Image: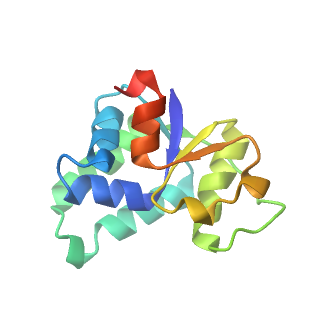
Amino acid sequence: MIIVVDTNVIISGLIKSFSESSKIINLILSGKIKLAYDTWILKEYEEVLKRKKFNINSKYIESIIAQIKEEGIYITTIPLKESLSDKDDEPFLEVAFAGKIDVIITGNKKHFPHEICKNINVLSPSEFLNNYPLSI
């Protein structure tokens, strides 16, 4: 299964052990699910993970980014026809549309309105874990 994951889930999963987001990270790092990304998303992951307030080891960040590059699915995107309320969330939807990926996992579902996302399932980490048997 291929998914798109918002940065807030990545951060939460790395700083909150045993959280629902952490389970998503473990599924990605174990190769059970693939992470779709583009250049912008990868850059944001790296920039946010490096923020001092999160206190994540730089070698660990490098390792995660390297694994995403190697095992994830790189998607070339085109801009959305309609804007989201938070422009920083647009690359996630662009990747989902361009890659024909039907799941975005986010902690901010309200930023992805159904009328714009159309047939893409925008799920919280717990909704994903509860609704996709593959992830259990």
User: Which quarter of the image is occupied by the C terminus?
Assistant: top left
Does any portion of residue 111 appear in the rendered image?
yes
Work out whether 67 lies above or below 5.
Answer: above
Residue 69: quadrant of the picture: top left
Query: Which residue is situated farthest in the top direction here?
Result: 134
Q: Is residue 46 left or right of residue 109?
A: left
Q: Going 76% across and 60% down the picture, which residue do you hit? A: 79
Tell me residue 15's x, y (percent). Answer: 21, 59
Tell me residue 116's x, y (percent). Answer: 77, 56
Tell me residue 52's x, y (percent). Answer: 22, 77
Q: 83 and 56: which one is in front? A: 83
Residue 26: quadrant of the picture: top left
Q: 120 and 61: which one is in front? A: 120
The number of numbered discs placed on residues in the rendered structure image is: 0
Q: Going 64% across and 36% down the picture, which residue do you hit? A: 102
Does any portion of residue 72 appear in the rendered image?
no
Work out whether 53 lies above or below 45.
Answer: below
Q: Is residue 33 left or right of residue 80?
A: left
In this figure, which colouring scheme has been used for the structure?
rainbow
Tell me residue 5's x, y (percent). Answer: 48, 49
Q: 21 and 2: which one is in front? A: 21
Q: Going 74% across and 40% down the picture, which residue do you hit? A: 119
Q: Going 67% across and 74% down the picture, which residue do you hit? A: 85
Query: Which residue is situated farthest in the bottom direction here?
Result: 53
